[in-house]
Image: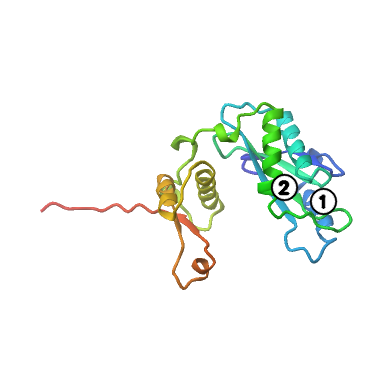
Amino acid sequence: MQQGKAECIYAGNFLREYGKMNFYQKFQGFEDRNVLNERATTKTLHVSLNFDTSEKMSNDKLKEIASAYMDKIGFGEQPYLVYQHFDAGHPHVHVVSTTIRDDGTRINTHNLGQNQSEKARKEIEQLYKLVRAENQKQISKQQIKPVDVSKVVYRKSETKRSISNAVNAVVNNYKFTSLPELNAALRQFNVIADRGNEDGRIYKHRGLVYRILMQRKIKSACR
């Protein structure tokens, strides 16, 4: 938000309007709920609602869709914040909430994406006459910004964000059945996925590490 790449456009079930709260007040709104349940390990919900590039979304429509989505997945009574993000070629918002109810119980999020979220997505597409996710074509290269290798500064947030944007766009829009196929898509954007050493923790837990694919220039001299 400080860099002008995101904007908070709505606060649901907070005591104040989103424009009248600073960062700490927003954070405290979630923390007041989270402290009610010390046993829960997952207390935060983060979802991204993405729309087709052809769809022109006003802030009011984004708020309305986000609110409808939260109602349909069972989080309509929870405090939540809606942020519009300007880091991609398509309209999208991020919604952040807490899984802890006001009585201290936790909302079960197991298979939330496959069950409630998928059903809500289809209903909202029909209700608001949105482009169906199944009909969206694979994004072109121009819609994902390749990581600028010449400007890489390791451990800097901008570099991590660029890698995350590329990975998320590829995973959400390309079909692949193996690691080589995934890397074939990622390489277009100067990113590669690595399983690590076979005796390493990441490999054993079937995880992946995403890193920048550095391009070396080979100099040759003619004698």
Number of the front mark, 2 or 1: 2
Q: Nearer the viewer, residue 100 or 124?
A: 124
Distance from Cα at disc 2 to Cα at disc 1: 12 Å
- For label 2, the residue is 96
Figure quadrant of the N terminus = top right
Q: Is residue 86 positioned above or below 186 on the image?
A: above
- Res. 123 in view: yes
In which quadrant of the rendered view does residue 120 lie?
A: top right
Give the residue at x 84% y 45%. Answer: 77
Give the residue at x 57% y 40%. Answer: 87
* Residue 29 badge: 1
Q: Position of residue 168 (x, y in %)?
A: 54, 47
Dot 2 falls on a residue whose secondary structure is strand
Q: Residue furthest bottom?
A: 199
- Res. 1 in view: no
Query: Please, what is the three-letter code of the amino acid marked with disc 2?
Result: Val
Query: Please, what is the three-letter code of the amino acid marked with disc 1?
Result: Gly
